[in-house]
Amino acid sequence: MPDTLLTPAQFLDHWQGHRRLTRRFIVAFPEKELFEFSVGGMRPFAQLATEIYKMAIPTLEGISTGQWNYDKTPMPATREELLRHWDDTTAAIETIFPQVPPGRFQEAMKAFGQWDSTGFGLLLYVIDNEIHHRAQASVYLRALGIEPPFFPDRS
């Protein structure tokens, strides 16, 4: 029995499964509501999805190299642009993740000069944040009378 819960490849597959599901949520929204609809003062889902993709690569690169740089690209203006950024980020994750030195996942670090964690803990936070925002999107979609994508399906 190995002494790890997941291999890096299994972790990457799990993360990418969440990203595939969240992409389906982006597609499920009518364009206008993707950028404008909110409930209870929460941000529209386009803003939440942008936050998700803007966290992924800077966190992954920071874990890999120790260089922590924020993604300062502007907010997308259309679903097409949002999906392009989403897909580019997904492809970059696929490329960068296998290059992370294995010891960095368990190494203690200070992300963006502010948050103490391990590489693994930071990646879990990125995934947890995505799940949290996807749950908000579920509420939005239901409020709009749209059935959200089936959350156990990560294919």
Image (spheres, rainbow, N blue to C red):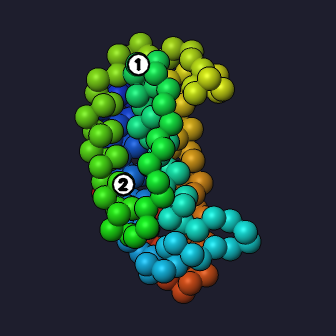
**Quadrant of residue 61 within the rendered picture:** top left
Label located before the other in sequence (2 or 1): 1
**Quadrant of residue 43 within the rendered picture:** bottom right
Element at label 2: helix
Mark 2: few/some/many CA within 10 Å (<14, 14-19, 20+): many
With respect to residue 151, does 32 lie above or below? below
Asked whether residue 5 is in view, the answer is no
Q: Residue at x 35, y 22 (%)?
A: 100
Q: Residue at x 28, y 27 (%)?
A: 98
Q: Residue at x 49, y 50 (%)?
A: 52
Foreground of the two, 50 or 120: 50
| x, y percent for residue 32 | 48, 80
Asked whether residue 73 is in view, the answer is yes
The disc at residue 86 is 2
Quadrant of the image for the N terminus?
top left
| x, y percent for residue 109 | 56, 17
Foreground of the two, 23 or 92: 92
- Say what amino acid the circle numbered 2 marks: Trp
Q: Residue at x 40, y 21 (%)?
A: 64
| x, y percent for residue 22 | 43, 59
With respect to residue 149, does 103 lie above or below? above
Task: Please give the residue where the numbered disc 1 appears in the rendered image.
Answer: 65
Mark 1: few/some/many CA within 10 Å (<14, 14-19, 20+): few
**Quadrant of residue 108 within the rendered picture:** top right
- Say what amino acid the circle numbered 1 marks: Thr
Describe residue 116's horizontal placement relative to residue 77 as left or right: right
Foreground of the two, 129 or 85: 85
Describe residue 33's horizontal placement relative to residue 40 as left or right: left
Element at label 1: helix
Foreground of the two, 135 or 93: 93
CB atoms at circles 2 and 1 under 8 Å apart? no
